[in-house]
Image (cartoon, rainbow, N blue to C red):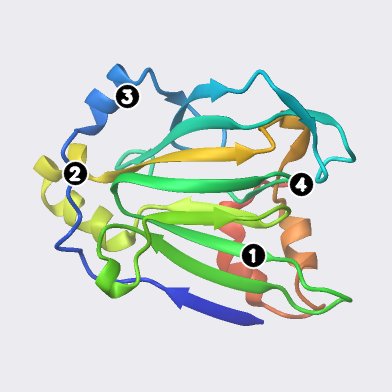
């Protein structure tokens, strides 16, 4: 397994959070997402194209959503989209774990990236996730821990991003990672899969 970590595992001096979570949820009309967190679709292009990632099925040119993780809902579940997704940061910090399946029976590649404003520490403002890559997001544990100690920070602990999916999102192109599929990503007998089992669905 190849593990690449790009993160700043300390509370960031750049982590501005101007708009509290309850205001974001109300003003942006966010709803709970089945992956975890909150979302709202903000654009679905009327022009359609044939998606090379979905057997040439017709899909919108692109779709766009807001996606929010909060102190109360700090974790997302592993899932995969056939289309590519560009993530753009608005405020807060979030950690993404990306698992690219191995080829010819080889082990997967795992990358951990942090979206945040501390670019000096390797945090990124944009994150591109290609087709057929398992991904999950979570608030950084140290940020959640600080908010647990200081409840006044809880409404200002989270991460708001925009996701642009291209070709556009369709539920037929989406799947959740299950325990059996997670285990199968690694060679028989490898315990590596166990570290992520809490973020997948049961079979």
Q: Is residue 12 left or right of residue 32?
A: left
Indicate the secondary structure of the residue bearing disc 4.
Answer: loop
Sequence-wise first label, 1 or 4: 1
Residue at position x 76%, y 37% from top?
Answer: 173
| Cα separation between marks 4 and 2 | 37 Å
User: Circle 4 is placed at which residue position?
Assistant: 203
Indicate the secondary structure of the residue bearing disc 1.
Answer: strand
Would you say the residues marked 1 and 3 are in contact, meaning their CB atoms lie under 8 Å apart? no
Indicate the secondary structure of the residue bearing disc 3.
Answer: helix
Q: Position of residue 156 (x, y in %)?
A: 19, 41
Residue at position x 42%, y 53% from top?
Answer: 138
Q: Position of residue 128 (x, y in %)?
A: 54, 55
| Cα separation between marks 1 and 2 | 29 Å
Q: Nearer the viewer, residue 29 or 179?
A: 29
| Cα separation between marks 3 and 4 | 32 Å
User: Circle 2 is placed at which residue position?
Assistant: 17
Res. 99 mark: 1
Residue at position x 58%, y 62% from top?
Answer: 98
Please tell me in which quadrant of the rendered image residue 91 appears: top left
Which one is closest to the eye, mark 1 or mark 4? 1
Is residue 75 among the parts visible in the rendering? no
Q: Is residue 184 left or right of residue 99?
A: right
Sequence-wise first label, 1 or 3: 3
User: Circle 3 is placed at which residue position?
Assistant: 25
Residue at position x 59%, y 55% from top?
Answer: 129
């Amino acid at each position: 397994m190849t593990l690449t970590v790009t993160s700043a595992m300390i509370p960031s001096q750049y982590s501005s959070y101007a708009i509290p979570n309850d205001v974001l949820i109300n003003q942006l009309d966010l709803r709970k997402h089945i992956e975890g967190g909150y979302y709202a679709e903000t654009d679905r292009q009327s022009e359609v194209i044939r998606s090379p990632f979905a057997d040439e099925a017709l899909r919108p040119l692109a779709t766009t959503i807001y996606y929010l993780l909060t102190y109360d809902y700090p974790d997302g579940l592993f899932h995969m989209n056939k289309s590519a997704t560009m993530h753009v940061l608005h405020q807060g910090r979030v950690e993404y774990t990306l698992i690219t399946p191995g080829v010819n029976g080889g082990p997967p590649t795992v990358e951990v990236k942090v979206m945040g404003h501390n670019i000096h520490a390797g945090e990124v403002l944009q994150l591109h996730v290609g087709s057929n890559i398992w991904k999950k997001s979570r608030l950084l544990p140290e940020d959640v821990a600080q908010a647990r100690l200081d409840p006044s920070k809880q409404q200002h602990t989270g991460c708001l991003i925009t996701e642009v999916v291209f070709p556009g999102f369709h539920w037929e192109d989406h799947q959740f990672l299950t325990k059996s599929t997670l285990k199968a990503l690694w060679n028989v007998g490898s315990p590596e899969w166990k570290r992520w089992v809490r973020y997948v669905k049961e079979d």
